Amino acid sequence: MRIQSNNFSIDDSVYKQAFSFVNRVEEGLQEIIERRTNGVVPRLQKVLKAFSDEGLGMHHFQSIDGYGHGDLGKELIDKVFANICGCEKAAVRMQFVSGTHAICAALFGVLRPGENLLSVTGTPYDTLEEVIGLRGKGQGSLLDFNIKYNQTSIFNNGNIDFNSLEKALRSPQQMAFIQRSCGYSWRPSLSIENIRDICKLIHDIQPECICFVDNCYGEFVEESEPTEVGADLIAGSLIKNPGGTIVPTGGYIAGKSSLVDLACCRLTAPGIGSQAGSGFNLHRLILQGLFLSPQMVSESLIGAEIISGVFHELGFQVKPLPGELRGDLIQAICFGNVDALKIVCRSFQSSSPVNSYLRPVPAEMPGYESDLIMAGGTFIDGSTSEFSADAPLRPPYNLFVQGGTHRAHIKIAITHALIALAKEEIVKLPTR
């Protein structure tokens, strides 16, 4: 018997050999998988409590068009997010086109010319480089508006080291930017405990400094969110974790009321702030996505553990290792080989539910410095939490895999990738 893949024909015995290897790795992770599965309950209880506390009813599913003034559903969604994040206020808006946009609105809304922004987690994610002004000129970046930028890194050989942060805080800083996810860096993602310690140190030295966390890919990974442990402001995307893979667009900002208001004045206009903005009759999807999110995040984390285990056993560097503490959904694999990188991306694409016939090739992407190769046959364009992989085309050719609504899909995708790598003699499939 032969199985027909979009790229090539697979002998049934080869498929069984590869899938058996993936299953064996999964079986060795049962204790971790059980812990991830059990973690859904407290996170879902948190969501259900927020729905109950705020009195969610079917009448909140409808939204008001036009200006969106007096929209009961929008007001409830904001309160639900604030409740879950343990903070004063949240603004959940379809008008945010991405997590980068939400972060950008917060940066420009809060900071003023002449003030200082400090990135404590090193160079930020590629799409923020032009927002800050590290690349590109004359587009209205922070540096164009005379907002001063500096960066340091709390990471030292993979460990958290506060010495560099303490030195950076010797000069006044109006905002400290903390990127929870690893982004395209080969470093650990931040745990909630890490974020707690960072915020405490910053506030101890400079009480007025605003701790702003890029929370993308981090929601529901742990039982608490950054605003519950000292962060003053967070932002993220609805087509990542909190949208449960069904929200079609949007983002959120949450934290102290005054800071959320300032960010919303940047999104809309001074004097309007968070008061306006239609929900485009998407309130039900936002709320349902939030309800589904804890389960989806758990499946994504389990899938990441399996991916880590498979490639680690094959001799590749992976971060994090199987069983290590995770602060986000992202699993990094260092291939050290551009051909292997392309093969895995194309295999993942061929296993996607949408656009499986496409062949990913490196290309320019708005906001990114390097050409990217991306695999993501998702129902919502850019919804990387549905299961996707992407990589900047630069040595050492690290692939960043994230998302997955259910581990069965992830296992199928990994199996096809292993067969493709074995066909090109890049890996040898284990025989036992």
Image (cartoon, rainbow, N blue to C red):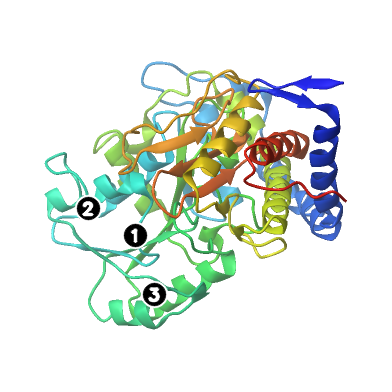
Whole-percent x, y for residue 363 in the image:
37, 31
Residue 147: tell me if it is visible.
yes
Q: Which residue is mark 1?
A: 123
| Residue in the foreground of this view, choosing between 143 and 49 | 143
In the rendered image, the vertical position of residue 190 relative to residue 282, given as above or below: below
Residue at image location 49% in from the left, 30% down from the top: 382
Quarter assignment of residue 172: bottom left
Q: Position of residue 259 (x, y in %)?
A: 35, 53
Tell me, yes or no, whether the two marked residues, 1 and 2, touch with CB atoms within 8 Å. yes
- Residue 84 versus residue 57: which sits nearer the camera? 84
Q: Residues within 10 Å of mark 2 (few under 14, many from 20)?
A: some
Q: Which residue is mark 3?
A: 202
Residue 362 position by quadrant: top left
Left or right of 410 in this view: 278:
left
- Residue mark closest to the camera, 3 vs 2: 2
Which residue position is annotated with label 2? 134
